Amino acid sequence: MPAPYATDPARSRGRRVAEEESAFRTPFQRDRDRIIHSSAFRRLKHKTQVFVAHEGDYYRTRLTHSIEVAQVARTIAGALGLDAGLTEAVALAHDLGHTPFGHAGEDTLADLMAPHGGFDHNAQALRIVTALERHYAGFDGLNLTWETLEGLAKHNGPVTGPLPYALAHYNARHDLELHSHAGAEAQAAAIADDIAYNNHDLHDGLRAGLFTDEEIATLPVVGDCFAEVDRLWPGLEAKRRRHEALRRVFGAMVGDVIATSRAHLARAAPPDVAALRALGVPVIRFSPALWQDLQAIRAFLFTRMYRAPAVNAMRAMVDEVVRDLFPIYLDAPEHLPEEWRADVARAGDRTELARLVADYIAGMTDRFALQSHARLTGKRLETKAGV
């Protein structure tokens, strides 16, 4: 039975362009399905988390990460009585705006776009689902419900301060109430993202040889999980031991979020989703103790993985690729594909053209960015970062 504070699909604020709703799916389920069938979602298959995609078939991509986030978010939603369709829609779409090469590519593109209104992957995700996907006869974008768009814009909390142009431009036409927290479903998707990357970055870093099982067994939570596996299965083969330990880390995080959020919601007792938004604090959260433990894990990963020498070498290559491509397309937009030419012709000034170039580069996969760079510059960059 849905909780009183769950977002009711029957009371959705609707779509910007009115449509006849599906006879078989709720509005939020329909949003989820449109996201899955979008071009941007398919491209996530060839966009990386930390490593360049073709360095190994076993590392996570944005696509596998998004599926993992949706699975965790769905579990949390089910335990707390939230709407699963809306939770999944936000979880599956949350990374659509990421550039090629993960956060390294985003950092470079944000620097290049600083004179032109900035760049942010959450704002870019909103731009993709409201404008850049162009498949439907009656509208640009996917024409998602207000609640899904709200979740994309502010699943990490209220958005304050100077807004990236992509978010400011859309919000001026369709107010997403950026000053408030999103509903609990979007919050569940956001914390599922934290859970998924904390777990799989440990797994990918181990596979890459950046650290060992023994080293991460000194970390909070992780060490207890290894100890439990050793107690239950002494002498277990290393690969199975690692898997059993890390899946327990996953379970510990999910269980903590469910127990902590359930207790917080019981104390706050919001009678509906509007009251939940008005609380002014997130309701889906880790316990303070686990949050502190996760900071220790993140600090370890930052030093040993995100800033490891091999990964830094990859970041330098990524920076060169994006910095070379951006001025080429900006100064010679004839290099953009034919279907982009009408938008180029409508660009009123260099800033509008820069935003189109950013849209194009942000939509590239890792592989296509490298191929385009080689074709347009004649450079052959070393893509094996030594991991």
Image (spheres, rainbow, N blue to C red):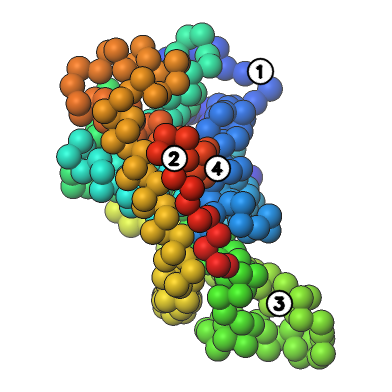
Residue type of the residue flagged with mark 4: Arg
- Considering the numbered disc 2 on the image, is that residue within a helix, a strand or a loop? loop
Q: Nearer the viewer, mark 2 or mark 4?
A: 2
Q: Which quadrant of the rendered structure holds the C terminus?
A: bottom right
In whole angstroms, how far apart are the C-alphas of marks 2 and 1? 54 Å
- Circle nearer the N terminus (2, 3): 3
The residue tagged 4 is 367
- Circle nearer the N terminus (4, 3): 3
For the point 48% across and 48% down, which residue is it?
380
Residue type of the residue flagged with mark 1: Ala
Q: Nearer the viewer, mark 2 or mark 1?
A: 2
Cβ–Cβ under 8 Å for marks 1 and 3: no
The residue tagged 2 is 378
Q: Which quadrant of the rendered structure holds the N terminus?
A: top right
Residues 377 and 246: in front is 377
Q: Quadrant of residue 88?
A: top right
- Circle nearer the N terminus (2, 1): 1
- Considering the numbered disc 1 on the image, is that residue within a helix, a strand or a loop? loop
| Residue 207 in the image, given as x and y percentages of width and height | 65, 70
The residue tagged 3 is 242
In whole angstroms, how far apart are the C-alphas of marks 1 and 3? 46 Å
Residues 384 and 81: in front is 384
Residues 170 and 53: in front is 53
Residues 186 and 94: in front is 94
